[in-house]
Image (cartoon, coloured by chain):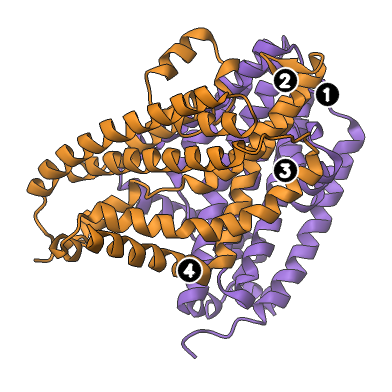
Chain colours: A orange, B purple
Amino acid sequence: MRALAEAYLIGARNGFQQQIQYRVATLFAMLGFLIEPVVYLIVWTTIAESQGGSIAGFSTNDFIGYYIAWTLVRAMNISLTPYVWDGRIQRGRINDHLMQPWHLFHRDFAMFSGWKPVWLAWWVPLAALLVLIFQPQLNPAPWQLPAFFVAVFFGYTLRFILLYLIGMVSFWTTRASALFEIMVAGEMLLSGRLVPLELMPPWVQSLAAWLPFQWTYQAPIDIAIGRRTVGETFQTYGWQLVWIAVLGVSLAAVWKRAIRRYSAVGA
Amino acid sequence: MEKSDTALLGGGRMISVRLTLSHWRIAAMNELQYRANFFVQIIHSALSLAVGLVAIWLVFDHTTDLGGWTAPELLAVMGVHVLVGGLLKTLIEPNMRRLMDDVQEGTYDYVLTKPVDAQLLTSIREVKPWHAVDIVLGFGVLTYAVIDLGRTFDVGAALLFAVTLTAGTIMIYCVWIMITSTAFRVVRSDEVLNLFDGFYQTGRWPISIYPFWLSGVLTFIIPLAFAVTVPAEAVSGRLNPNTVALAVVFCVVLALVTRRVWAINLRHYSGASA
């Protein structure tokens, strides 16, 4: 167990150093990420204003807070995309890792986790700029900020496992990217990424309740902008952990079969 | 210097057109070998169109107009956005990526040693025909929107649409090649290109809904207002004649500036192999 912790620390440090080296690239990527929520923010505050200040229980101020919190959630939930698996499998690049004593998952997860401090460091000034431009009224309770970070971390873990699971499909077909795109479309509509789920028709909301997506976007955001009580926050963590467990167990099962199918190219 | 070179080959403009067409044909044939990519592209385009339509539908589920734009008018904007996006991804973006790769690897020498205008050759070497799916889809959405607007076919409007769309697309090309040609100086500007892709997404909505600082950027720095909103105004009959004049003038000015910037940047290319 201590050895695994050490492996995590080293993996995270590698990821951190990589991002520090490419910090300008990270800034540009981050700026690119900001455009999507800023567009939503402007569209929905415009509509809220034209409808007397709020829609479906969301005030103009709520929308501003929602999409600013969104930017941190997005920066933190970047995960290994399924595209990576195509290259790994086609070029036999996972061979080395299969010889290591730890599951490749740990190495990838540690590496991506190591990115987060660098992204966070860029996020702070950019978020401050957004607050300055859009001027939300912020009055979070003291517990909300740490509670938000915990939910963001669980959300990231959940999304990482989900994308990893989809990446596994590459062991069977070279067209896993199509499945990934379908997932992203689902995520757009069913996670609160495009709009808060309250704005969706009731049947979409009930569909979303059965899927993991909302726990990666809307749940953490809601905590940040004070739309969840302490009890609801713990409920959120509960659901996030349930999904992490379900997807984690599925991943372990799929990985076993996938690795059996894999015949190292270049061996 | 470039002018005299093309004249040597016996035909200025004509040879440029022929050169462009044969480059496009060869590049397209090369891509068309990979037929499965066609289906991947269809899935991709259909999904992003579906999400875009849902977004518009959600907006009008909660309001009757967005900053003075009705649902069919917004649909027209989206149609033009998809259409222009298809044009850019088919004809322009692949060339910009190729330019950056060549500069990084030092293979751009091969373009410079050819007896044709370097900017022309740089801009016509690659075509990604599968992205034309977006051109077709965008045109379909636009047609639906025009019918929904209750407008009958009108030669004047169609002409204005063609003029503003062409001018707008040229403007985007100009800005894009100016950004990319900075690759001669800083080598890695692909992150800037990704950012450009991000900015393109803002064009899905009429530029006028954005606050002035953002709409200013999207009109005169990254001219999405001219490339998407203005042609959409042309088909929905919202267009102010002054805007057309402004678009044409701005397009010409931008093209001239681009030519200068290109020449200046080109002098900074030193050839990685040298």
- Residue plotted at (30% across, 44% down): A164
Residue type marked 2: Glu
Image-based side of A39 in relation to A109, left or right: right
* Chain-order first, disc 3 or disc 2: 2
What is the distance, in whole Å, between disc 1 and disc 2 at their CAs? 9 Å
Image position, residue A26 (x, y; %): 55, 60
A209 to A261, vertically: above or below: above
- Is disc 2 placed on a helix, strand or loop? helix
A143 to B90, vertically: above or below: above
Confirm or deny contact between disc 1 and disc 2 (CB under 8 A): yes
A213 to B110, vertically: above or below: above
Q: Which mark is residue B101?
A: 4
Please name the residue that numbered disc 1 is placed on. Answer: B238
What is the distance, in whole Å, between disc 2 and disc 4 at their CAs? 40 Å
Q: Tell me the mark number nearer the camera, choosing from 1 and 3.
A: 3
Confirm or deny contact between disc 3 and disc 2 (CB under 8 A): no
* Chain-order first, disc 1 or disc 3: 3
**Chain at tag 1:** B
- Is disc 4 placed on a helix, strand or loop? helix
Q: Please identify the quarter of the rendering in which residue B140 is found.
A: top right
**Chain at tag 2:** B
Q: Residues within 10 Å of mark 4 (few under 14, many from 20)?
A: some
Q: Which mark is residue B73?
A: 2
Confirm or deny contact between disc 1 and disc 3 (CB under 8 A): no
* Chain-order first, disc 1 or disc 4: 4
Do pointers 3 and 2 mark residues of a single chain? yes
* Chain-order first, disc 1 or disc 2: 2
Q: Please identify the quarter of the rendering in which residue B208 is found.
A: top right
Confirm or deny contact between disc 2 and disc 4 (CB under 8 A): no
The answer to whether residue A172 of the structure is visible from this angle is no
Q: Residues within 10 Å of mark 2 (few under 14, many from 20)?
A: many
Q: Tell me the mark number nearer the camera, choosing from 1 and 4.
A: 4
